[in-house]
RNA sequence: GUCCCCAUCGUCUAGUCGGCCUAGGACACAGCCCUUUCAAGGCUGCGACACGGGUUCGAAUCCCGUUGGGGACGCCA
């Protein structure tokens, strides 16, 4: 039995979007599960639209997601000589021919066919041309079989049949001699000895053409699996207007790669009622044959829920690692002082659905906040709060052990002594320390903030209240 | 328009070869409980087999049609 070889072959004309990420994931999982190889190939034959930045974004996204490849990245732009060779081979064998039709001519043909309510397709008018048209650089067209059918036994679709008469003679080389997509894919998929081509549904119509070219080259096609597309909330193909679609955008918005991957694998696939899959579980349980046939709608709420789940249940050290990165984006370096991010994760994880949220609501541990949240200050930093704050200040100053337990006791005792409900003491203190009415439990907040900053901020709050009119 | 594909709660889905489905789970939503903030957590509720014909003792599960949706029809990939 031959080893499984899969590939992800994006074109570098933009960022890696989540649809592409899912395709990459499925290919990666399939290869990993079968102990095969996963290959990354950059399809940059369109030199107009391909950019270096896009290549970098794709590589960065793959790395962030943890989808490692065994070979590549290969660049199609490095393989032009090989493509030229294959085109010549097809030409020599009479399986391809030169076409001298101008774009205008082809446009007219298309319009005419549309008007006649027919499927627009090239009519093969240059098929038997023997003489070149002077002054015209021709394109090369593949001579598609005129009869018969192409049968695809798709791993997710089942059997799909295309009649050859529905197909036309597609262009495999442009007039400048460069190869086009359908040719390069075929050459590469063959040369790279891929056993399985797992790709988006939108390629299903290309498949019979590619199979025909493969056969013309005397090769056996690999297995195909066309996975359904991801739709936006309005039912149309997911795009920028549906919100964030770039993988790096999700990273920047505070999502964990595990959460995104878990979300993506469950889109169009399920294993009973199981919702949470570690990477190892995915590898063990995922099978391309179990993928649904129907398109699915992207649901940001569920992704957010998964993200929160991972923040709460993943190894806190791992979360802390990601939190450091997000703190860094806020110009905070925990190494320069303040609590260990690990402790911050432990204190904050229940209430933060994203790492960005966690970084933002934890910034006060590391640096002074600019000003109090208006509503929080108005409600809690009132003259009545002066007595408890002053009393707390004295006790915090005197306490020997700066640990949650004794700190907690002080807050409780203060409320008791002053005959106040706990909320009347804890809330003003919380606002004093964090600037807002939301923070981890008060003892934890005190502990993480440290004595020095605690005392400073209580002072600041007292002055704030006394300065009010 | 032509060709290809798809069709279970608002969304993601479970539903082994038709019976155990008065259709299960998750997200979201609503309510209750817990509670020193916000959360987290627990419980309850809301909510679907697109429609019409068949086949069968019996269909969400099989067949046909209708409707609806998506994709492809480039010297883009």
Image (cartoon, coloured by chain):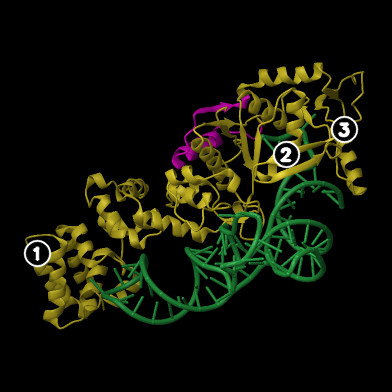
Q: Which residue is mark 1?
A: A397
Question: Which label sits in the foreground, 2 or 3?
Answer: 2
Where does the magenta region start and end? A48-77
Residue A313 in view = yes
In the visual, does A61 lie left or right of A147? left
Magenta highlight on residue A50 = yes
A72 drawn magenta: yes
- Characterize the local packing of mark 2: few (<14), some (14-19) or many (20 or more) Cα atoms within 10 angstroms: many
Q: Quadrant of residue A420?
A: bottom left
Let me know if residue A369 appears in the view: no
Q: Position of residue A171 (x, y in %)?
A: 79, 30
Foreground pick, B55 / A454? B55
Q: CA distance from mark 2 to mark 1?
A: 77 Å
Work out whether mark 3 precedes mark 1 in sequence or the reverse, and give the earlier one. Answer: 3
- In the displayed orientation, state which residue is furthest to the bottom: A419
Looking at the image, tell me whether mark 2 or mark 1 is earlier in sequence order: 2
| Quadrant including the C terminus of chain A | bottom left
Front position in the image: A434 or B34 = B34
Tag of residue A152: 2
Q: Indicate whether A208 appears above or below A87.
A: below
- Identify by letter the chain in yellow: A
Q: Which chain is green?
A: B
Residue visible at 83% across and 36% down?
A164
Nearer the observer: mark 2 or 1; the answer is 2
Q: Quadrant of residue A392?
A: bottom left
Q: Mark 3 Cα within 10 Å, few/some/many (few <14, many 20+)?
A: few
Q: Nearer the viewer, residue A36 or A132?
A: A36
Res A146 label: 3
For the N terminus of chain A, the image quarter is top right
């Amino acid at each position: 039995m031959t080893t499984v070889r899969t590939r992800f072959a994006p074109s570098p004309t933009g960022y890696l979007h989540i649809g592409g990420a899912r395709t990459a994931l499925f290919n990666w999982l399939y290869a990993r599960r079968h102990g095969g190889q996963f290959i990354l190939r950059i399809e940059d034959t369109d030199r107009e639209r391909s950019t270096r930045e896009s290549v970098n974004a794709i590589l960065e996204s793959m790395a962030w997601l943890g989808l490692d490849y065994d070979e590549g990245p290969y660049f199609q732009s490095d393989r032009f000589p090989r493509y030229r060779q294959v085109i010549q081979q097809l030409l020599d064998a009479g399986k391809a021919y030169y076409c001298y039709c101008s774009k205008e001519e082809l446009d007219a043909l298309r319009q005419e066919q549309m008007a006649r309510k027919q499927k627009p397709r090239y009519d093969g008018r240059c098929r038997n041309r023997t003489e070149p048209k002077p002054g015209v650089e021709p394109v090369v067209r593949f001579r598609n079989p005129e009869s018969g059918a192409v049968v695809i036994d798709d791993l997710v679709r089942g059997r799909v049949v295309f009649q050859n008469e529905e197909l036309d003679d597609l262009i495999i080389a442009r007039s400048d001699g460069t190869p086009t997509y359908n040719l390069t894919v075929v050459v590469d998929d063959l040369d790279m000895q891929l056993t399985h081509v797992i790709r988006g549904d939108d390629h299903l119509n290309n498949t019979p053409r590619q199979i025909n070219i493969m056969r013309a080259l005397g090769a056996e096609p690999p297995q195909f699996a066309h996975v359904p597309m991801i739709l936006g909330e309005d039912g149309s193909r997911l795009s920028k207007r549906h919100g964030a679609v770039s993988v790096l955008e999700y990273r920047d918005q505070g999502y964990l790669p595990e959460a995104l991957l878990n979300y993506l694998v469950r889109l169009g696939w399920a294993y009973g009622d199981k919702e949470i899959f570690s990477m190892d579980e995915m590898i063990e349980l995922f099978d391309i044959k179990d993928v649904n046939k129907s398109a699915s709608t992207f649901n940001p709420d569920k992704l957010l829920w998964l993200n929160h789940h991972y923040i709460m249940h993943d190894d806190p050290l791992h979360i802390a690692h990601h939190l450091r990165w997000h703190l860094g984006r806020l110009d905070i370096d925990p190494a320069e002082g303040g609590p260990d991010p690990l402790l911050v994760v432990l204190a904050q994880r229940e209430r933060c659905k994203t790492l960005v949220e966690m970084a933002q609501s934890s910034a006060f541990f590391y640096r002074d906040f600019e000003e109090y949240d208006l509503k929080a200050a108005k409600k809690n930093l009132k003259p009545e709060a002066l007595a408890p704050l002053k009393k707390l200040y004295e006790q915090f100053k005197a306490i020997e052990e700066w640990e949650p337990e004794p700190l907690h006791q002080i807050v409780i005792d203060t409320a008791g002594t002053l005959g106040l409900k706990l909320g009347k003491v804890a809330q003003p203190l919380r606002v004093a320390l964090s600037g807002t009415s939301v923070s981890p439990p008060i003892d934890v907040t005190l502990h993480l903030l440290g004595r020095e900053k605690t005392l400073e901020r209580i002072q600041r709050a007292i002055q704030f209240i006394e300065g009010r009119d």
